[in-house]
Image (cartoon, rainbow, N blue to C red):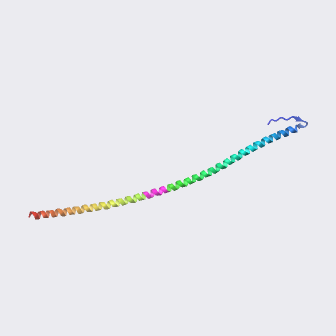
Amino acid sequence: MGEKFKRAFLGYKIDEVKQFINNEKAEFDKLYKESNSEFDAVAAENKMLKEELENIKKQISSYKDSKDRLQNILYKSYIQAAASLYDEQKKLETMIKEKTDILESQKSKNAEIKASINKLLSEIKIIVED
């Protein structure tokens, strides 16, 4: 700024002062327009970034919802699988017990049959020896 003006009668030369003011105003207007266009560009970029941020927030929310649904599905599947496994294990234990009882019964019957056969063989032997 340090502009020096020539002295005139009762002050400074009016034309020089007006010219200086016009030059400063032109420079100010130019800077103002540049700053406004920069401001508009920054404002537009800011708006775009805010919209992008909102979209990303929506996507994150959607991903969290999907994650929660998948975790819920996996948990329910795990519970169903565990319950099914438990039920099948109980069925197998019941089947094993039933088959073991049948085997024990068959062993008992086999022992009775062997005893009967041995008794018959003894009686036949006695009859044959006489």
Query: Where is residue 22 shown, x and y percent of the image?
Result: 82, 41
Percent position (x, y) of residue 35? 73, 44
Residue 102 painted magenta: no
Q: Residue furthest right?
A: 9
- Magenta-colored span: 73-81
> What residue is drawn where x is 81% and y is 40%?
23
Q: Which of the two residues, 46 or 108, is positioned nearer the viewer here?
A: 46
Question: Looking at the picture, how far across and down is residue 126, in whole percent?
Answer: 11, 63
Q: Main secondary structure of the magenta part?
A: helix
How many numbered circles does the render carry?
Answer: 0
* Residue closer to the observer: 32 or 101: 32
Q: Quadrant of the N terminus?
A: top right
Left or right, residue 42 beside residue 130: right
20 left or right of 107 in image: right
> Quarter of the image holding residue 37?
top right
Residue at image coords 53%, 54%: 66
Q: Position of residue 91 (x, y in %)?
A: 36, 60
Q: Is 80 inside the magenta-drawn segment?
A: yes
Residue 4 located left or right of residue 83: right
Eyeballing the image, is 117 above or below 61? below
The residue shown at (45%, 57%) is 79
Image quadrant containing the C terminus: bottom left
Residue sitting at 35 percent across and 59 percent down? 92
- Identity of the residue furthest to the left in this view: 130
